[in-house]
Image (cartoon, rainbow, N blue to C red):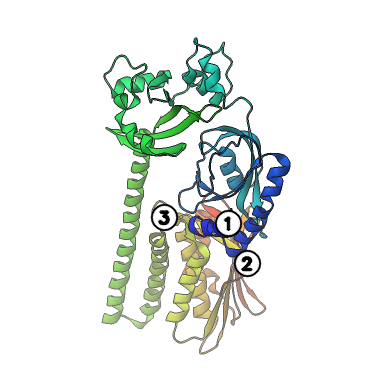
Amino acid sequence: MNETALEQLCRLYTDLTDSDIQVLKETAKTLPLYAELSGHYMFIDCMMKSSGQAVVVAEALPRTPEAAYKESVVGKIVFETFEPGVHYSHRTGKKSIRHRAITQEGKMVEQSVVPIRNDQHEVIGTLITEAEIAGAAGSFAKAAERPNISFGSEALGHLLADTVDDYPIVTDLLMEIFLVTDADQRLVYANPAGVRFIHEMNEAEDIQNKPILTLLPFLTELLEHQEEVFISEVSVASKTLEVKKVKMHSKTNELKGILFIIQDLTELRTKEKELLMKSVVIKEIHHRVKNNLQTVASLLRLQMRKGFPAESRSHFEDTLNRIFSISSVYEMILANEHADEDDVDLIELTRKIGSTMVLNDLNQKVDLIIESNGNKILTSSRKAVSIALIVNELIQNSLKHAFPGELSGTIQVDFFSHKKFAELHIRDNGVGMAGAAFSLGLEIVHNLVVNDLAGEFSYKNVESGTHAAITFPLSPEVVIHYEKTDSDR
């Protein structure tokens, strides 16, 4: 395969950067040499950006009298069911050594997989070596010489684990449905689950050697696909089934039969639909909460325009800011493209709340600086509401008390993380806040930190301004991801 084809496949199927693709191109140049030296089949696979499967982007085959592959597999999909080692290495970044796999042509091979990493040590692909398993291709031929065991049974036993003849075939003990046909698509083997399934779907009593499409017509579409290995999800009556088809060949590449593995996904898909409905309901609740908060805010603004005692104005403004802070949490949840997630990015939430408050305070010249320090902190909506109110109260106090008159200054928000704790620091370089420790706002902050976040809160005047520090433990509801950038402004 030439380099241009590798680039085209990577750009079509993956989210890899140009530098990542260059790393793969350099690796691909070495494949023919290693394939010839080792006598093994060499491949590079990359994860596809949408399906969760992998795709072959490069290959090199040794020059042997009998090749294991009849045609190129570049551009073919790599299903996790048949090549679990590839997907394991992609996910974990670890090696997978000498595990069995089934190729795109339905042959059993011994496969070793190592991850390929970029300069940032991120896994961008996998390097695979494959070796044929001695005797695997001849299982049908052996079966033909032993009339006491159907060739389908022996082939299936070999595919699964080289079962000893004196023991039951492994498939007899499994819940999945295993069916094997001969080259004429007549049923020659069905495990107990398969027999029950066929009787459930078809009233025929005698199923041995019957055409598989007579017994299970829904397999027609799968048989029309020419791929050696194919997976499809089908709906039959009230059932949802995942069907895997594997063509099986003799040592001379003659088609001897087809293996079908059928798994009933009905219960799983039903639960997924229930979860989806739950997610839709939760999102609707979030939407209504946000709308109700905006309605309350509109009523408060209407009351403010109609007039009220001057000494009450600050209380109305404080209340409006609190409502806006809570509403911001729900706006961010609703903006999340994943309807089943209610995680909120605390850095973005703080930026949204803080920048709006500073912009709305037209009488002051205050710069707001937010330092993420390489952290991305995600919290549940419940925790996010508490933190939104905390950020609101502390920034609001600085705007009110730190910069009297037309005094300009800076409010800085810092996020830090440790192994078990997260820290939030809000500083200003104003005149300080003598006597403010007994204000309603700081009492709200203290109660939220202690009761909702199970954390600690300190607030004090420093040499130039004030410093509020909040420490709270990490938990399943508070998760930190480390980023490359150190600050956001």
**Residue nearest the observer in this picture, 28 or 92:** 28
User: What x and y, as percent, mark residue 146?
Assistant: 53, 12
Pointer 2 or 3: first along the chain: 3
Q: Nearer the viewer, mark 1 or mark 3?
A: 3
| Residue 427 location, quadrant | bottom right
Give the answer, above or below, for where 175 lies relative to 293. Answer: above
Q: Amino acid at mark 3?
A: His
Q: Amino acid at mark 2?
A: Asn
Distance in Å between CA atoms under marks 2 and 1: 12 Å
Distance in Å between CA atoms under marks 2 and 3: 26 Å
Q: Amino acid at mark 1?
A: Ile
Pointer 2 or 1: first along the chain: 2
Task: Write down the residue under mark 3.
Answer: 338
User: What x and y, as percent, mark residue 478?
Assistant: 54, 54
Q: Secondary structure at mark 2?
A: loop
User: What x and y, as percent, mark residue 458?
Assistant: 60, 65
Task: Write down the residue under mark 2.
Answer: 373
Q: Please rate how many residues cluster around mark 1, counting C-alpha atoms within 10 Å: few if below 14, some from 14 to 19, many from 20.
A: many
Q: Is residue 20 visible?
A: yes
Q: Please rate how many residues cluster around mark 2, counting C-alpha atoms within 10 Å: few if below 14, some from 14 to 19, many from 20.
A: some
User: What x and y, as percent, mark residue 443?
Assistant: 50, 65
Task: Write down the residue under mark 1.
Answer: 480
